[in-house]
Image (tube, coloured by chain):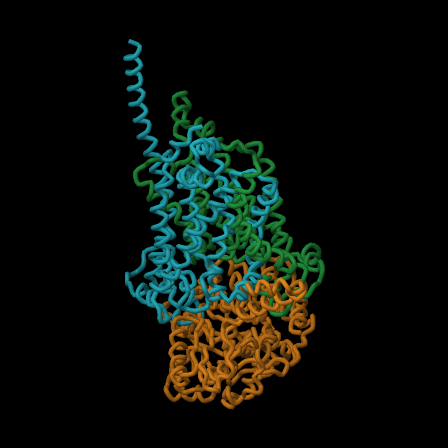
Amino acid sequence: MENTNNEARYIKMQKRNERKKLIVHGIKYLVLVIGALIMLYPILWLFGASFKSNTEIFNTIWFMPKSFDIQPYIDGWKTSSQYTFATYFLNSFLIVIPKVILTLVSCTLAAYGFARFEFPAKRILFPIMMATLFLPGIVTRIPLYIFWRNMGLLDTYIPLIANSAFACDTFFVYMLVQFFRSVPKELDEAAKMDGCNSFMTLTKILVPILKPSLITAGLFQFIWTFTDFQGPLIYISSVHKYPVSIALRMAMDTTSADFNWNRMMAMSIIGLIPSLVVFFSAQKSFLGGSTAGGVKG
Amino acid sequence: MKKERYLSLIYLIPWIIGIVVFVIYPFAMSFYYSFTDYSMLSSPQFIGLANYKKMFFVDPNFWQSFWATVKFVVLTVPAKMVFALFIAYIMNAKLKGIGFFRTAYYIPSILGANVAIAVLWQFLFKNDGLINMIMERVGLQGFGWFSSPTGAMFTIVLLRVWQFGSAMIIFLNGLAEIPSELYEAASIDGASKFRQFFSVTLPMLSPVIFFNLVLQLVQGFQEFEGPFLVTGGGPMRATYLLPMYIYDSAFKTFDMGYSSALSWVLFVLIMIFTAILFKTSKKWVFYADGGNK
Amino acid sequence: MAIIRKVKTMKIKGFVISVITVGAALLSLSACSNKKSTDSDNGDKVTIRMSWWGGDSRHKAMQAAIKAFEKKNPNITVKTEFGGFDSYQEKLTTQLSGGTAPDVMRIDGNWITTYKDQLVDMSSMGKELGASNFTKDKLAAAKVDGKQLGMPVSTIYRQLFVNKSALAKYGVAEPKTWEDLFAARSKLPNDVFPFYSYYQPKSVTSLLLLQIMAEQTGKPVGNADNKLLYTKKDFTKAVKYYKSLVDKKITPSKKEIDNSGIVEGAPFPGIVNQKWLSLFSWNTDINVFATQFEDMGATLDIVPALTMKNGKSTGELSKPSAFYSIPKSSKHQQAAAKLINFMLNDPTAAKLQKVENGVPDSKVARNTLEKAGLITPLMKKSLKIAEGTVDTKMANVYRWDQPTTMEAASDAFTQLDYGKTDVDGAATLLYNAFKEQESEFK
């Protein structure tokens, strides 16, 4: 008797909830669509601008070009060097992929060391780590440049990648430390009981739980490295080793009569594609509640 | 306990090597440079505290940049945090096509310092731009955004709030880690969505809010591209933030010594703000691992 | 094992010394990764590096010319490093600071005083460089403290680009003097300005000021030893003149420029919508404006630098557009000189490069281009005007348009236009900056 009553009330509640959900969803969609338009407009405009003439680009905020002509894409792709943009894309990946992998490995290890172990030196090391976030990179450039010159490694990708192998991207170490801390320590102890050593605890238990956070770190590193201009500018001299970020500005001389902004816009659209693809495929891992199952206090 | 200490060292060894080679050494060099006259083209000449004296007692541009930077951070960081959290909260739903929306909202951040943004911002805020047109349509007076110190600051604050993508991702990530059981329990207790946000989401998210705040603060203080792209530091240096001054000192006027001194002042400034944050965090940040650091 | 025993028997002091020597040897080995060649004239194969900035067409032309050079000199391989103008100097400075600069570098005319201690004195290399193809004046432009620090590529001139069709629409004749501009004011609508001097939000040049001062005083900014010749009074007088240009609405104020929707490096909105009717700039930009005006459906014309009543100079300023220089760190200076000679003076190279680097200073190269009909009519006109009116007394004026003085010009004019300072305040600011620049030359 009590049971059926409860059930009926439950079904009623569920129906009401569903209706409410529908309305809430509707509102959410409305907000999202309006927001998305504002967010997407610049890229729409950029796309339109890649078909416009120089004066048209700087004269109208409306994205639609007067005519569509893919010539800027063809010319831009060819570049003024003897290499096409394909070479520059390949170069970018030669930097980005090792860098992302090394960052994930080294920063996970360092973050684990910071987040899961108590030791006296931590009182000094942790603030040191934080402090490395605070100094603008520009003033450390000359000493580092001279260091890499003495190592004979200028005009290679090593100066761009090496610091990631040693967990020197403090941003990510700090980020991962925080995510480690959101995982209860009881889990480690349970793993220990089951005979896991600390490394196995990390790889078998913690890394799977932290997968979304690691994907986030990898994603940021991918996008930031892909668009980084300052690093390659200083270290890479040979044209055939330029990554996309440099190649994009290779012909950026506004006093040159054939400087066509549309060509640069066209190539920057192409240059955005890898980041967009990576982002779109990575964002699935942030789906709510999907990873939380194993984390019961 | 002793074993733990060694274990932790194993994990930290790569970082320690890296920090010595890639960080401590160049940091020490830049600290030394800050006491020198160094054009990068001839060897540094030790001049004692002259750079710092010039900065604090002679150079009006320093104080202008200093206060502009503080103003920028104080305006941008809270606005960006609230906005990013709000959007992330909506985005954390299993809606159809949510992947598309997430990507769309991240696009401004991917665009970063693209010239398209420089051009669009001018279209929005110039004299006969979109914003002024709208203002005049509703009966308000048009405003010289780029010729008003406050207006120009507003345009770059808005730019950075609009590029809230990475803050949003960090929030999304944190939201995903909140066990759904907690919400279920709360809704069985009859808590409304609104109540749930304050009783479940915010406390559970507090560590993520905290460190996102730290990251945004650090990034805010190192802001360079926004003003570089949109206002050029003007008008009358109202948006000439310290990192821009640091850059120009180094690579425009070739005064690496002064540039280094400016950097160390910025360093201390960020450190003070972060230290205050860490101090207050004990009161409002809740960690799953039970620690309180 | 033997080594270990040997080390063990050695005294500690000896050991330390040997470690240091080995370490130093290793370091120097790695530091010299670009191999040291004995002499390129011996027929040994050498590789040299050359860097420049530019746009697509210059990149293509330069690469083609370099290929021709390699064909002619099979012993020399040239590695090219090129990019946009943005941040080119930043990279070059880093390289010079690290002793890794390319063997041949294109440097802007303005930079020669900045880099004077890093560059090879070419005085004794005249023959290898083909210096006889240049007039004394042109060579002198690259001289600092009596040292020949570079070879001139081309010369550019400060000129006025006018929107002929728009002027005609308002019934205004092409201006010849500053007074003409003042007279034109009454014929123009309120929001149309007869003159605009290339001020952008970030980059403000001091050249407008310097031209006014040249005409007012008849003196260049500094003498041959870079001593400032202008007094505080001279600055006050010039700033007053500038202020009258703004007050009488001859030129848009900095405030109006800031709000005009201007994007650094992009076409100027006031020019594109034909509200600013003339533009004061270097004639390097001729082709840029020619295409732009064509796009706008307007007619472009070039007129000489404006003169003033009772003026003591034509005000026509010139500047070497760029130099090819060799850094002292270069290990292949002979080969580098050969390359410079080829790029500047070889007829084949001239034909391949056309006017991508401006109309060449080298007589052979210029003749070749003139004969081949590769100089556009507009460019010819510009050169004819410029070479006829240029004030050679002012040859070194451009050297004072440096970051320090540009920044001061920007601050002074901005504060003046925003009403934050008066003529005296602006003049003091400028005078102090030029004094500072004077000391920076040393």
Out of B142 and B219, give the one closest to the viewer: B219
Chain A, which colour? Answer: cyan
Quadrant containing the N terminus of chain B in the rendered view: top right
Q: Give residue B199's position: percent from left, percent from top.
A: 47, 27
Vertical placement of residue A148 versus C309, above or below: above
Quadrant containing the C terminus of chain B in the rendered view: top right
Q: Residue furthest top?
A: A1
Residue at (57, 87) in percent of width and height: C124
Q: Is residue A110 visible?
A: yes
Q: Is residue B3 left or right of residue A60?
A: right
Q: Give residue C55's position: percent from left, percent from top.
A: 41, 70
Q: Is residue A253 left or right of residue A150?
A: left
Out of A54 and C56, give the one closest to the viewer: C56
Chain B, which colour? Answer: green
Chain C, which colour? Answer: orange
Residue at (30, 26) in percent of width and height: A18
Vertical placement of residue C329 versus B123, above or below: below
Q: Is residue C377 visible?
A: no
Q: Is residue C146 left or right of residue C344?
A: right
Residue at (44, 66) in percent of width and height: C271
Q: Which of the 4 quarters of the picture holds residue C398?
A: bottom right
Vertical placement of residue A89 versus C229, above or below: above
Q: Give residue C166's position: percent from left, percent from top.
A: 42, 70
